[in-house]
Amino acid sequence: MPDLGSLYRDLQSSFKAQPCDLKKCGTLLAQLKVGLISAGLLVPQEEANPKDLQIARDILEIGAFWSIRSKDIPSFDRYFSQLRTFYDDYGTILPPSPREFPIRGLNLIRLLTQNRIADFHTTLESLPLPADSLTSNPYISHPINLERWLMEGSYSKVWNAREEAPAEEYKFFVDSLMGTIRNEIASCEETAYESLPLKDAATLLFFTSQSELLAFAKQRGWQVNLSSGTITFSRKGEEKMEIPKEKLIAANLQYARELEQIV
Amino acid sequence: MPADVDMKIKDDEAKKDNDTPTEETKPSVPVSPVAEIKTNVTLIERAVSTLEPRFTHRVLRTLTSLRKKLNWKVLKEAIEGVYPADSATKTHLLSWIPEVPAEETTSSMDIDPPTNTTTPAPKPVTQEPVPEAEVYLRLLIIHHFLTSPSTYQKAGELVHETVDKMQAWNRRSMDPVAAKVWYAVERAYELGDELANARPVFLAAQRTASLRHDDETQASLINRLLRSYLAYNLYSQADKLVSKTTFPTSAGNPQYARYHYYVGRIKAVQLNYTAAHESLQQAIRRAPLPATAPGFYQAVHKLSVVVEMLMGDIPERGLFRHPVLERALSGYFEIVKAVRTGSLSQFQATLAKHASLFEADKTYTLIARLRQNVIKTGIRRLSLSYSRISLRDICVKLHLDSEEDAEYIVGKAIRDGVIEGRIVHEKGWMECGGQKGGYGPEVAEVFGRRIAYCLELHNQSVKAMRYPLNAHRKELADAEGAREREKELAKEIQEGGDIDDDEPGLGEGF
């Protein structure tokens, strides 16, 4: 397949070029994928030449990075699920790829930003690493730490860690992650404080300018008192105690029926 | 009818054999393995002829103890005794058995003498036993192959041949034995270090089994598959298998216990702790006695302790004093202590100390998730003991990194409803609100949940009860008899009535 070979070299050079030519990569990737399908390598079957498989894996890995750089998350998703075959099922045949863990880590962050915590843990559990060495792999420990901090509420640590990404691509997720964090913090503040000075609110929410904060406050419906410089959170009035009649009746009927069966 | 008499003698022997476990305290003469296999074969034949799987189950129960007594000589003798002299199956089975090494003969000689007293003099066997018996013998041979690494290869070959034969026969009376064979299949693959390759075989067999309504094999196979998925950490595949299959309700308790354990593990990984806890409780309830199966009991409890803590509960202290669990759970006990006191530093130290243990139990990642629970417990304790506490102090007491962190963490705890209170940012402290009154709809809810649990427990126990087959026939017969008597009674009353009626008639006649 001389056609595939030259395309592949083309892709490699244009992917490595600084700055990377995203558009050209995209078209090349589309052509390469068609080529892979016709060669039966996109979803490898039976006995395939390990060399060919390695090239196919390389192409898909570049594709995954390319999708992140062009901010196309669904496309990353597709590339990742195709790559899993190579990582999981052909892991023993192929030499390990240096890009494997960065891509796995990116996938973990993607799950985190989409708030799919259950999937995050399932994926974490299925990583081909012993559990106590997870933290020693920089690509994997980053998302693990982020998840832990998010769960316990150490938001400032998440904020500080955004610059410590182990790979360039991780930063593409930072923005959406920060959006998630701000919303989390805001909902915490609404219940935990009665009022906050504007300046402190800005630092808590990691805003640098007051105008950003005001726009955010408006979006969440907070009452801003500019003269005294404070934000007051509207308390949801103490919920009125109400006896859930229907639920109680249903429960009692259920008990009666069960008792009938026992006696 | 020589065959009939033969059956009778063996029946008596079977009874004797069944009595021995109950009277094991006195030094009874051990039944020689050869005789045991022979009686087992007759029991299987009886099971097939009377369509009572009970007998086969009885045979399979002795499998574990019998397995340890096997050697090639025993197997050879058993096969020769069971099959008629010119049987093709016999020669085929014997071809699997290697030449008997010298030392084995001597060791079995010690057991031999009592054999002569218990087994009847060898009679010429004329009938070919049922295929189920053949599969049973094959199962014994496979198990013996699996005892030494040099014969794993042969075990694999025999396993394949046996499976092919089983599929071809397609006999429902074979199901209980077949389910055991699948266990042997898994073991053969695992010892050959290629458990992953067994999956397609299992999947295909599982489809066949579910089409044939072969519940026992199905139950066994689903567990085999789940185990294989979990061994390779393929949780999403395992979860899909669970959601796509229905575990046969007629499966035995041990299979059920295993299934619940696997489901519990999957659910725990997916953060569905309530469902995981429920499954694990079922697994514990259905598990064999702790003394007979300590390994399973310990494994389930390890997982259940972790899941319970992830749910925010603290396991009972008594659990860690259980004789079977005490040693196995010691590492977990230290974690529980750390979580209970809410000490983050102690938790981290314990986690690091027992890392290899948790890793081996595959609970490490689950336990690592407990970190946030430790913090929550700590904040909760502070909120209960102080009405006002500065963020600085919280930070020191919980070993947090900075005051800033403490503020966010407390804020999250308030939002998540862990504590009641609010933060006063200007003064840098947390004010804890008073406790809510003890009564309200939530109390009813908790109460309702508890009742639901009790009812569920009752229903599950009723379902787990076993009734002897056809026992209702007897009742029906009784009912029939009662109806008969009633009829007679009614008749008598009627006749009596006639007499009564007659009397006035008599009078009239006068």
Image (cartoon, coloured by chain):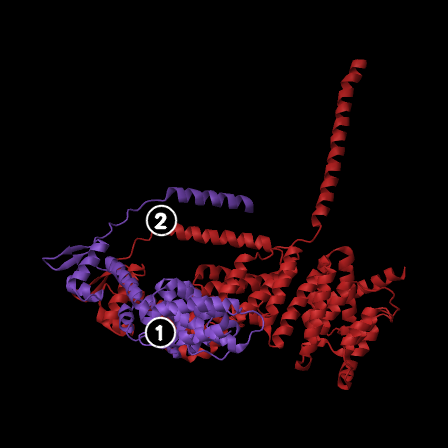
Chain colours: A purple, B red
Residue at image position (68%, 66%) is B61
**Amino acid found under the numbered disc labelled 2:** Pro
Residue B283 position by quadrant: bottom right
Residue at image position (31%, 76%) is A18
Residue B365 position by quadrant: bottom left
Tell me the subunit letter for badge 2: B
**Amino acid found under the numbered disc labelled 1:** His
Q: Nearer the viewer, residue A205 or B136?
A: A205
Note whether residue A94 is visible.
Answer: yes
Percent position of residue B118, x then y: 82, 71
Residue A180 bears which disc, if any?
none
Distance, label 1 to label 2, CA atoms, is 43 Å
Note whether residue B342 is visible.
Answer: no
Percent position of residue B397, x then y: 27, 73
Q: Residues within 10 Å of mark 1 (few under 14, many from 20)?
A: many
Q: Residues within 10 Å of mark 2 (few under 14, many from 20)?
A: some
Q: Is residue B160 left or right of residue B111?
A: left
Residue A142 bears which disc, if any?
1
Q: Establish if B360 lies above or below B236.
A: below
Q: Nearer the viewer, residue B264 or A210?
A: A210
**Which residue was labeled with disc 2?**
B441
Percent position of residue B341, x then y: 35, 70
